[in-house]
Amino acid sequence: MTRREAIESAVRILAPRIPRHEFEAVTDHALGSRGLHTANPETAAWLSLTAYIRHRLTDYDELLDDGYDAESARFFVLDDMNGVLEDWGSPRRVSGEEAE
């Protein structure tokens, strides 16, 4: 199994109802991120998935632009992130203690 196949499989398990275009974006990010290059496929998929949701589907970046620090901005988008994960059929949720 290639790394791409392993990450795709992990994304499908983590978010079985993720729309196709978002599936591709999350997978490509997990593969292209230097920071995720050495992570196991499941970790790379989860971190890429949560980063995608945070930056593309919540007000996180706008909160940062408005002067909130990253920790506060993450707190304010937590429910929105978990709502997307629920909609996509994910068995996992983001907690307030997670760094990424």
Image: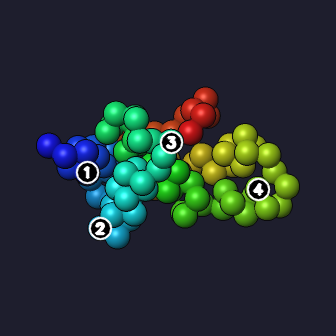
The answer to whether any part of residue 66 appears in the image is: yes
Answer few, some or many: residues within 10 Å of disc 3's Cα (few below 14, many 20 plus, some between 14 and 19). few
Looking at the image, do the residues carrying marks 4 and 2 touch, with CB atoms under 8 Å apart?
Answer: no
Residue 26: percent from left, percent from top: 40, 57
Answer few, some or many: residues within 10 Å of disc 1's Cα (few below 14, many 20 plus, some between 14 and 19). some
Secondary structure state at the residue bearing disc 2: helix
Q: Is residue 41 left or right of residue 72?
A: left
Closer to the camera: disc 4 or disc 1?
1
Residue designated by label 4: 64
Instruction: Please tell me which residue lies in front, 60 or 7.
Output: 7
Q: CA distance from mark 2 to mark 3?
A: 24 Å
Q: CA distance from mark 3 to mark 1?
A: 16 Å
Q: Amino acid at mark 4?
A: Leu
Q: Which mark is residue 4?
A: 1
Residue at 79% across, 46% down: 69
Q: Amino acid at mark 1?
A: Arg
Of callouts 4 and 1, which one flags the residue occurring earlier in the amino acid sequence? 1
Residue at 60% across, 34% down: 99
Q: Amino acid at mark 2?
A: Arg
Looking at the image, do the residues carrying marks 4 and 1 touch, with CB atoms under 8 Å apart?
Answer: no
Secondary structure state at the residue bearing disc 3: helix
Of callouts 2 and 3, which one flags the residue occurring earlier in the amino acid sequence? 2
Closer to the camera: disc 2 or disc 3?
3
Answer few, some or many: residues within 10 Å of disc 2's Cα (few below 14, many 20 plus, some between 14 and 19). few
Residue at 35% across, 55% down: 27
Q: Which mark is residue 20?
A: 2
Q: Amino acid at mark 3?
A: Gly
Q: CA distance from mark 4 to mark 3?
A: 22 Å
Residue designated by label 3: 35
Q: Which mark is residue 99?
A: none
